Amino acid sequence: MSRDPVSILHIRKRILAIFFITTLFLAALLSRLGWIQFVMADELQQRAWAQWNRSVPALSSRGNIFDRNENLLAGSAMAETVVALPLQIEDHFLTARALAPLLEISEERILELITQERAAVYLERRVDDEIVREIELLDLPGIIFRQEPKRYYPNDNLLSQVLGFVGTDQGWSGLEIYFEEELKGLDGNLVFPTDNKGREIPGVRSFIPAREGLDLYLTIDETIQFIVERQLSQAMNEYSPQKAMALAVDPQTGQILAAASKPDFNPNNFSEYENEHWPLLPVTDTFEPGSTFKIIPLAAAIEEGLYNREEKITCEGSVQISGHTVRCWTSSKGGHGEIDFFEAVLHSCNPAFIEIGEKLGPQKMFDYVRAFGFGSRTGVDYPGEGSGLLFRPEQVRSLELATSSFGQGISVTPIQQVMAISTIANGGKLMQPYIVGEIRDSEGETTTKREPELVRQVVSEYTAAEVALIMEKVVKEGSGVNAYIDGYRIAGKTGTAQKVGSDGTYIPGEYILSFIGFAPIEDPQFLLYVAVDGAKRGPQWGSQISAPLFGNIMKDVLSYLEIPPQEVLSEGEDPE
């Protein structure tokens, strides 16, 4: 019996449809298999690895910090950290009870940690070796140790504010945080496979080593730093100020040789100190500079041909400007009387500098102030640098111009003053200051080397030399005589600035006493700024407190640098 052609055709269509659907299904299946096999292979392999394996990070050894002579200032030693592998702990209560007295952590807290659904948890970081040995004797399943670096500072407080310190896992202040990326290195891992319950399969551990951080080599000289800090500590004891600070540079290069402020702290035990002791005040602090600022309008006037040393001025102790009385420091004695401008500079006469400011005018005056670097950050490689505060052009009237000419009404940072006076020492060049001179890897290969960088030429070599010779006379015959060192030609300037309170008014009887100078004049190699803030004992003059402090530091540093005495100007010799 023959089949109906229509039925046969219908069957064939059904077979073709089934074949077509099956082919599509197989094609989709093969495509999906190919996608998984070739496109998603890496991702799935990583997922599988994560399921099969567990890892405990191994922190990298932090880079060391050295001074310019390769003396160690900050280093890292390895210490043991106690780590729990919760899935491998057999008796959580027993483990917590055994570890609590050794780690000085409550049983409840340890139990909370070791019952987490995590591959590994920290129980205690960087524990003493004796505790590690006691825990090892307990032979507790699921409790392991790993080594990680512990930061130490061999000189304790010395250079603490420059270096900063390291917290649990990273730098928190100073160079430690500023150069965190360079110092921290790259972490490694301790890797081990586990079964389906997360238990370690013994004997198959692998270790991916950490990569050490880079080492910093500073421009700081450890010996000069020690001299500076020793003298600052003596000043704290002798005058009982709120704080004292110092900053020293090589004026030819901008390299910082020493920097400190007191009170300071010990970075090995930083948590025991108030955080107000952490910053490096010569970089972060801003205040009215006082008479150390007078060098700026003096240099500007000489550069512009407006300074005549023989021109006479009569100082009566005060000047009336826009209805305000602006006093000279000799106001109680009736002023300096009739003197020439050279004598006025030597004796830091405010009315004379007011007249210099008037000759310059607001535009030129503040153009030079900004050219010397005031009003903007220097860009030194240290966190939290202050910028100071200058009058805006529209704010400068007769009174603002007058007070700015002798360092009042504006705020600056010590590092700005240091770099500005460095231009007088080096022939008129404003240099970029820096603390880190070189960065090397763990093999000792240099990765970064800093070179001296010229920001701009501010004044001519002639002007710089003229100002330097006048500053030498200030030390030899003027207000800076207490900074004089027999046999050496030293340039300097005193400063006595009233302190401004939080309400913007001057605090009666409180001053910032400062001195800035450099030596030797023939080839300046060392420039130093010192300031004593809020002295409770001693005369309230920079010439009486800060000038001797400067002299004590300078004398020791010149001896250390083996700079021999120079021939000094004979009495009455013209500095020009």
Image (cartoon, helix red, strand yellow):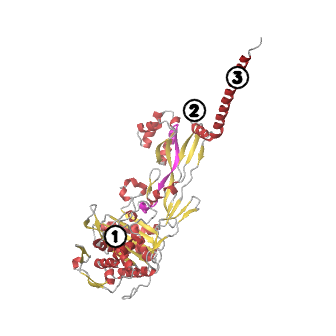
Q: Residue furthest right?
A: 1
Question: What residue would you read off at disc 3?
Answer: 13
Which image quadrant is residue 491 in?
Answer: bottom left
Q: Is residue 368 above or below residue 285?
A: below
Separation of marks 3 and 2 at Cα, in angstroms: 51 Å
Q: Position of residue 27 (x, y in %)?
A: 67, 32
Q: Position of residue 543 (x, y in %)?
A: 32, 75
Q: Which residue is depicted at the point 57% across and 44% down? A: 190
Total labels: the figure holds 3
**Which residue is nearer to you in this view: 438 or 433?**
433
**Which residue is nearer to you in this view: 247 or 134?**
247
> Badge 2: few (under 14), some or many (20 or more) residues near its Cα, within 10 Å?
few
Range covered by the magenta-colored residues: 136-162
Q: Which label's residue is closer to the chain start, 3 or 2? A: 3
Separation of marks 2 and 1 at Cα, in angstroms: 71 Å
Amino acid type at mark 2: Asn
Q: Is residue 407 left or right of residue 332?
A: right
Q: Is residue 152 magenta?
A: yes
Which image quadrant is residue 519 in?
Answer: bottom left
Q: Are marks 2 and 1 in contact (CB under 8 Å)?
A: no
Amino acid type at mark 1: Pro
Amino acid type at mark 3: Lys
In this rendering, the label closer to the viewer, 3 or 1: 3
Q: Which label's residue is closer to the chain start, 3 or 1? A: 3
Q: Position of residue 207 (x, y in %)?
A: 59, 46
In this rendering, the label closer to the viewer, 2 or 1: 1
Which numbered tag is attached to residue 527?
none
Q: Is residue 90 above or below residue 438?
A: above
Q: Is residue 443 magenta?
A: no
Question: What residue would you read off at disc 1?
Answer: 289
Which numbered tag is attached to residue 196?
2
